[in-house]
Image (cartoon, helix red, strand yellow):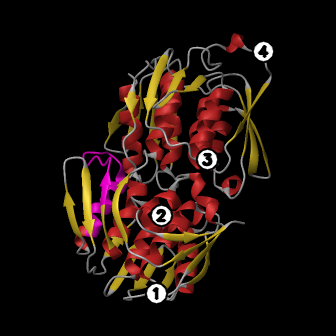
Amino acid sequence: MKSVIITPSSLKGTINIPSSKSLCHRSIIAAGLSNGVSNIDNIIYSDDINATIDGMRAFGVIINKTENGLSIDGSKSILFNDEINDQDEYYIDCIESGSTLRFFIPISALTDKKVTFSGRGRLGERPLDPYYDIFNKQQLKYYNNEGKLPLTVEGRLSPGLFYISGDVSSQFITGLLYALPCLNGDSSIILTTQLESKPYVDMTIDTLKKFSVSVTNNGYKDFFIKGNQSYKPYDCKVEGDFSQAAFWLAAGALGGNIELNDINMDSLQGDKVIVDLLSKMGANIMIKMKSVLIKESVLNGITIDASECPDLVPILAVIGALSKGTTEIINAARLRLKESDRLKAIAVELNKLGADVKEKEDGLLIKGKEKLNGGTVNSWNDHRIAMALAVASIKCTDTVIIEDSEAVKKSYPEFFEDFKKLGGIITN
């Protein structure tokens, strides 16, 4: 279990934001479903993205690294050509990537082949019931380990009506949106509850459009998907990731002067809201053409509805812990089903540093302090917890030791290197 030791210091300088993990997943999958070659530039090779790349390769998609990204040829995929390979079963190791698992399950049901999904960490415990309900209704065969991974799926999806809850995870909707256009008939996804994390569905629909696949969004209540559509190759560059930018924006506001490059303020990414939230808390932010400059600021606590930006909660908790007054994070119950129980994890670990964080059923109540103490904390094997705690070190009076720091490889392998480039003092 690797640890890092961080000596508190201000972070200053310019940073290039890594590409959006969400858009990398989506672009790689859409390219793999296309009958031809697509070139996807600006890929970050995190553990999650590598799981999606290897998953598409398992389906016969040819993926090669280029100077700037990936060349992806989906023409030899078993998803289009069952006769290409007479292999009886295919195996996909999703590692700890919920996106890979949930996006791929419906795609695997485009073929009669038997597909087995495995994973590790908490991935095997994350719910898949919306898919099981669909499989039961359509009489598709599936086998799991007492409700956990590994999961084997066998049989083809049929077009029709797909009823699904909108408040468990938008990943189920994205998975269906990828698969249903390829079916021999029209389909509709009908939401039985209000949709949370709408921006993630927006990103999916926008990616599909770029690859020539059309989806009709009827006010986020239902989605109509015409059948017999074909993905067409498309070349693109993946934009910077606001989920990762949030850590550097917080670092700049708490103690530094940081300019972030590769920022698209017209992005559909829901986590773009971090800029507005920090502004409401009093941050000194200047938005330029393709960058954002943030300076050390006096921040004030606010109430934050996390239903549309759950991935921001760990770093928002750090910001709240070091702001004046009280910060309340609400509508965040889904965070208990992530790589860790993120509400519990960030509350426990910040309190170890001397913060005042109260865990609630669906959120956090945080009383801000000017400084935290420092100490030894643990990432809970969660990349966002590890990165948030690193940023918290900026305002500590003593060193911060983060155990299991390698969790950052899941989404941002170079995080600690970038931290040091901005003046962070880290020893191993």
Q: Which residues are magenta?
A: 259-278
Which amino acid type is shown beneath numbered disc 1? Leu
Q: CA distance from mark 1 to mark 2?
A: 21 Å
Please give the residue where the numbered disc 2 appears in the rendered image.
420
Quadrant location, the C terminus: bottom right
Res. 372 mark: 1
Neighbour tally class for label 2: few under 14, some 14-19, many 20 plus, Cα within 10 Å: some
Q: Considering only order in the chain, which callout, 4 or 1, is on the residue closer to the N terminus? A: 4
Q: Find numbered disc 4 in the image and state the secondary structure of the residue it sits on.
A: loop
Residue on which disc 4 sits: 86
The answer to whether marks 1 and 3 mark residues whose Cβ atoms lie closer than 8 Å is no
Quote the CA–CA distance across marks 1 and 3.
32 Å
Discs 1, 2 touching: Cβ within 8 Å: no
Badge 3 amino acid:
Asp
Q: Which residue is mark 3?
A: 47
Q: Secondary structure at mark 2?
A: helix
In the image, residue 369 lies in the stretch drawn in magenta: no
